[in-house]
Image (cartoon, rainbow, N blue to C red):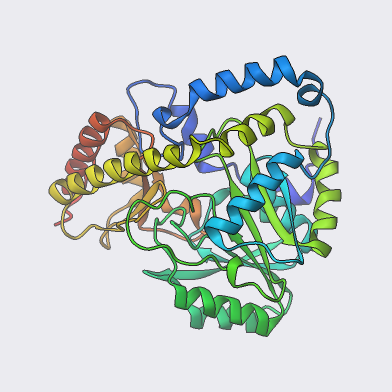
Amino acid sequence: MEYRISYKLKNLKPSAIREIFKSLSDPQIIAFAAGNPAAESFPSEFIEKSCADILHNNTVTALQYNITEGYPSLRNAVKERLSSAFGIGKDFDETIITSGGQQGIELACKVMCNEGDVIIAENPSFIGALNAFRSNGAKVVGVDMENDGMNIRSLEQALKNNKNAKLIYVIPTFHNPMGITTSKEKREKIYALAKKYGVLILEDNPYGELRFSGTDVPTIKSMDSDGLVIYSGSYSKVLSSGMRIGFLVAPKDVMSKIVVAKQVEDVHTNILCQMICQSFVTSDQYLPHLDKIRALYKKKSTLMLEEMDKCFPKSVKYTRPNGGLFLWCTLPNGIDLTEFVSQALKNKVAVVPGTAFNCDTEAPSDSFRLNYSTPSDEQIVKGIQILGELLKNTGAK
């Protein structure tokens, strides 16, 4: 039988990262391609005790249906943390719990965009978001990145050229895949352009708690006095990625429709996991836990960069993140990225080619993403040495 797949999904390609994950079952593979938090960052003992306590003392709440907006105690905890740490939360805003940050991104697109509408995104950008936009029939228009964020002149031109633009999607803090942070000046300009052209901003900030050096930069949502910003966050990188707990903040008129859309998707996010999350983020262990993770990722990032400085040809350029999980490498002209990535995998090192993050699926790339949170220190040293040798074999100087 010939299966007639919907137009929305017919040409949608699987995430290159998810496909690469299949190769990571080989224990010999050094996984620079993942985006996982470090295994040693999980507060496993707390989670075990919290789960036992909840199931013993609050069984019905944990195992029964609950409201779509999320477990009320967790929603309150999220609001308090967003207000104190990020200056987020106006009277016109509402907060809900989502099944990971990914769902929040997809719901924002589903509610705001008709098929054929445009979403303007940083180029490169997070593949999960790009596929969410494409699956909802939106057209993605990329704006090239500079060292301190989007090219503002190109952003305004994209807004002029696309009258049906509905969202500007940005990851301004420890960008995935590039690892850079958008400057305060550019955040203010992005907000000003959104206001000028009547377009909402979707600010994705799953890494905001993971700054290990430098100075905090205000979120765009903290600047939002006009109800222009939808803000997506997650506990995947600071508690557990497998628990799938995220959150979304949006103006109430937008959020009322997002809640309806979420009811269609999953009724509500896993309540037991929400309750465990709430018990952790309101405990006296949460802030020390964040400090521990930041120190761990600073150590891993520093080690990777030191090895790259020693082993990589000088013509290979790479970013130096102040937080998050990723850094971005750019090859000199003339090197075949596809062949390089293939050779790396044959040598048991997995990296993600930059083509996976392009807004234009047919566009080439000369860059690749590295992750330092997942591999061990020994794997970081060995993997970077292998990549360095492969780069030298390409003729890079």
241 or 178: nearer the viewer: 241
Q: Quadrant of the C terminus?
A: bottom left
246 or 76: nearer the viewer: 76
Vertical arrangement, residue 188 with respect to residue 260, above or below: below
Point out the residue furthest to the front here: 284
Vertical arrangement, residue 48 with respect to residue 342, above or below: above
Vertical arrangement, residue 122 with respect to residue 288, above or below: below
Vertical arrangement, residue 67 with respect to residue 158, above or below: above
Does residue 82 appear anywhere in the picture? Answer: yes
49 or 38: nearer the viewer: 49
Query: Residue 62, percent across and down?
Result: 76, 24
Look at 77% across and 51% down and name the residue there.
7
Q: Is residue 128 left or right of residue 164?
A: left
Q: Quadrant of residue 377?
A: top left
Q: Is residue 279 left or right of residue 150?
A: right
Q: Is residue 301 left or right of residue 154?
A: left
Total numbered badges shown on the rendered structure: 0
Q: Quadrant of the N terminus?
A: top right
Query: Residue 42, percent across and down?
Result: 47, 29
Query: Residue 37, percent across and down?
Result: 45, 36
Look at 23% across and 57% down and name the residue there.
316
Does residue 98 appear anywhere in the picture? Answer: no
Query: Residue 251, percent across and down?
Result: 76, 64
